[in-house]
Amino acid sequence: MEIRRLRSLEDAEKYRIIRLESLQNCPESFVASYEEEKDFSIETFMHQLQSDGSFTYGAFEENQLVGIITLYLDQPYKLGHRAHIGAMYVSSSKRSLGVGKVLMEEAIRKAKSIEGIEQIYLAVVSTNEPAKKLYSTLGFTVFGTEKKGLRVDHDVYYDVDFMILFL
């Protein structure tokens, strides 16, 4: 398996496919929705991949993108010591094979390499035990829970746990 940063037009095309898959398959795991992003142009995805404030990595197996993760940097000066992990997704056929762990390790490694970053935050649906277990094994701890933090389909609510890793 190859893990690398996504930057090219070909990467953006593959990223768009797995991103939309993630929004369809796990709507409770993302703030964005499939309906919001399905009509985004390939240029929009390219812009996201090439943003100065974020680093998107992909897990490739035989040239197929099977997992993604993005590390976002906080921009305001007073928050410059913080980074966030988001858009984490592994295709259902590749789960429980260590892909998520390798992606998380790459994002953590990148955060550690950026001068001034001292902590990484992430948010996870409270009922997503496999993800929470993974994050905990990597050193993340829950520091708060937002009741009904995410609403899907106007009538289904999910609590959201906020986790932090001090570097």
Image: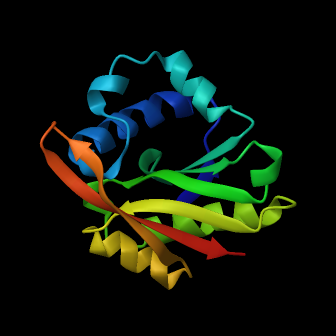
Q: Nearer the viewer, residue 72 or 19?
A: 72
Is residue 97 among what the camera can see? no
Is residue 114 among what the camera can see? yes
x and y, in percent, of residue 49 in the image: 61, 34
Q: Residue furthest left?
A: 155
The quadrant of the image that shows the C terminus is bottom right
x and y, in percent, of residue 135 in the image: 47, 74
Looking at the image, is 109 positioned above or below residue 12? below
Identify which residue is drawn at 63% across, 64% down.
Answer: 120
x and y, in percent, of residue 83 in the image: 67, 56
- Say which quarter of the image contains residue 6: top right
- Say which quarter of the image contains residue 16: top left
Identify which residue is drawn at 75% across, 53% down.
Answer: 79
- Say which quarter of the image contains residue 153: top left
Looking at the image, is 154 positioned above or below residue 30? above
Q: Residue furthest front?
A: 147
x and y, in percent, of residue 22 in the image: 32, 44
Q: Nearer the viewer, residue 66 or 31?
A: 31
**Colour logic:** rainbow
Identify which residue is drawn at 55% across, 17% down.
Answer: 43
Lateral position of residue 163 relative to residue 125, left or right: right
Looking at the image, is 16 positioned above or below residue 147? above
Identify which residue is drawn at 42% across, 73% down.
Answer: 98
